[in-house]
Image: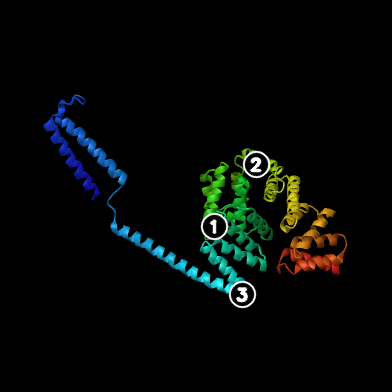
Amino acid sequence: MLFAIIFVISFLLVLYIYNNINQKKYSQNQRLKLKSPKLSLGISSLFIICISSIIYYKIGSPFIDMNKLNSSKLKLIESKNQKDVVFNQDLKKLNELLLKSKVDPSNLNVLLNLASTASRLNKNDLEISSLNKILSIKNTPKLKSLLAQAIVRKADGQVTSKAQKLINEALIGNPLDPGANFLYGLAESQIGNEEEALKIWFKLYKITKDSDTWKDDLETNIRSAAKNLGISNKVLQDKFKTSLDFKNSITQNILNLNEETQKIKINQMVDQLAKRLTKSEKDLNGWIKLYRSYKVLNDKEKAINAIKVAVEISPDEVSLKQMLLKELLPTSVKPNFTSEVKNLINEILIYDSNNIDALFFQGLNAFTEGNKKIAAKSWGKLLSQLPKDSPMKLELLKKLKSIKD
C-alpha cells in the first residue's frame, strides 16, 4: 500500500512537470540549455523514480504479513504476562519468607529460600543480608561463593575487595566451585591479567555443562580475554564445539600464542602494581593481587613476601595465613617445620580450631618429631571432618595405626 501511494505521487509529479514544460517552454532554459521538452521529462521522471526507490529502500518492504505480526505481538504479550505472574508469585513468596524468618531467624531453609527469591527479584541487599545470616550459622565454601556473586552483582560486575576475600576462602575450601572460579577469573581480568583469567576460565569451561546457566557468560569472557591476547575467535570456536581439555596440546598452543608479548605485558603490569603498593602499603587487596601475579610468573620468593605483607595488614584473616602456610609447605617437597611455620600453624588454630590444613600439618610435625600423643590428637580431630572414603582419611588411619602399634 505504501509503495502504491509513493508511485501515484511520483506519477502525478511527472504529469505536473510535463505540463509546466509545455506551457513555459523549459527547453529554452539557458542554465540547462535543453532544447527538447521530452528530454526534460525523461530526466525529471528518472530523478523522481530514483527518489521513490530510495524512500522505499529506507522504509523497507511494506508488504508485512499481518497474521505473523499479530502472532508475534500476542507472544510478546503472553511472555510479559507470564513474567508478571512469576514476579507477583515471587513477591508474595518473599513476604511470606520474611515473616517466617522473623519467627525463626535460624531456619536455614527459610533463609536460603529468602536469599534465592530476593536474587530473582534483584533485591541485592536482602539477598546479601540473608546469605550473611546463613554464613554465621553454617560456614561453607558454596555459601561464600554465593555471597561473593551477590556482592559482585550489586557492584555492577566489579569484583570488590570483600568479594575477593570470599572468593579466596571459597576456593580454599573447594577449588572446583564454579561461581568462585568464574569470579576469580573476572577479578584477574579486571586488573589486566588476561592470561591468568583465560587459564582459569578454560579450566572452568572444561567442567561446564550445556545446561549450566553461566555457560554463555563464560564463553563471552573467554572470547574477550582471548581477543586481548591476540587469539582469534575462529581458533576458539573449534574448541567451543567440544569440551575443552586444558592439558591438550592444541589448547596449550592457543595459550602460548604471542607468549613473549604476553610475558612482557604481565611483567609490566606486575611492576606497576608493585610500584604503586610502595606508596600504598596498607592496600590489602593490592598485595593479594601482587601475590597472585607473582604466582603466575612462578616467582615463589616474591609471592611469599607479598602474602606475608597481606598477613601483616590483616592478621586476623585466617584464609591469608592458610595461603601463606601452603606456600611455606608446598606438597612437592619435604616439609620443613621452621619456627615460623610452627607459629603460623598455631595462629591458624587459635582462630579456627578445626582448620583442616593446620590440623594436618600440626599432626605431621608431631609425628616426625615422635610426639605421638599430639599427632594422634590433631589427626583424630581432623578425621572427624573428612569424608568416609577420603584418600587423606585412609592415609591418616594408616599412620595412626602405626602410632598405636
Q: Is residue 9 left or right of residue 73?
A: left
Q: Measuring from the top left, give residue 224's x and y in whole percent.
A: 54, 47
**Residue 319 sits in quarter:** bottom right
Q: Which residue is mark 1?
A: 214
Q: What secondary structure is found at the residue carrying circle 3?
A: loop
Judge whether residue 136 can be spotted in this image. yes
Q: Measuring from the top left, give residue 3's x and y in whole percent.
A: 24, 47
Q: Measuring from the top left, give residue 257's x and y in whole percent.
A: 60, 41
> Is 243 or 302 nearer to us in this picture?
302
Q: Is residue 228 above or below residue 404?
A: above
Query: Which mark lies nearer to you, 2 or 1?
Result: 2
Going by the numbered disc 2, the residue's amino acid type is Met
Q: What secondary structure is found at the residue carrying circle 2?
A: helix
Query: Which mark lies nearer to you, 2 or 3?
Result: 3
Question: Which mark, residue 359?
Answer: none
The quarter of the picture where the C terminus appears is bottom right
Instruction: Point out the residue furthest to the right here.
Output: 370
Pointer 2 local density, CA inside 10 Å: few below 14, some 14–19, many at least 20: some
Q: Which residue is mark 3?
A: 104
> Is 161 or 364 nearer to us in this picture?
161
Q: Is residue 381 above or below residue 237?
A: below
Q: Which residue is mark 2?
A: 269
Judge whether residue 35 can be spotted in this image. no
> Does the residue at mark 2 contact the one at mark 1 (Cβ under 8 Å)?
no
Q: What secondary structure is found at the residue carrying circle 1?
A: loop
At 75% from the left edge and 60% from the top edge, which residue is drawn?
Answer: 357
Going by the numbered disc 3, the residue's amino acid type is Asp
Q: Is residue 134 left or right of residue 333?
A: left
> Does the residue at mark 3 contact the one at mark 1 (Cβ under 8 Å)?
no
Q: Is residue 405 left or right of residue 178?
A: right
> Is 379 or 15 nearer to us in this picture?
15
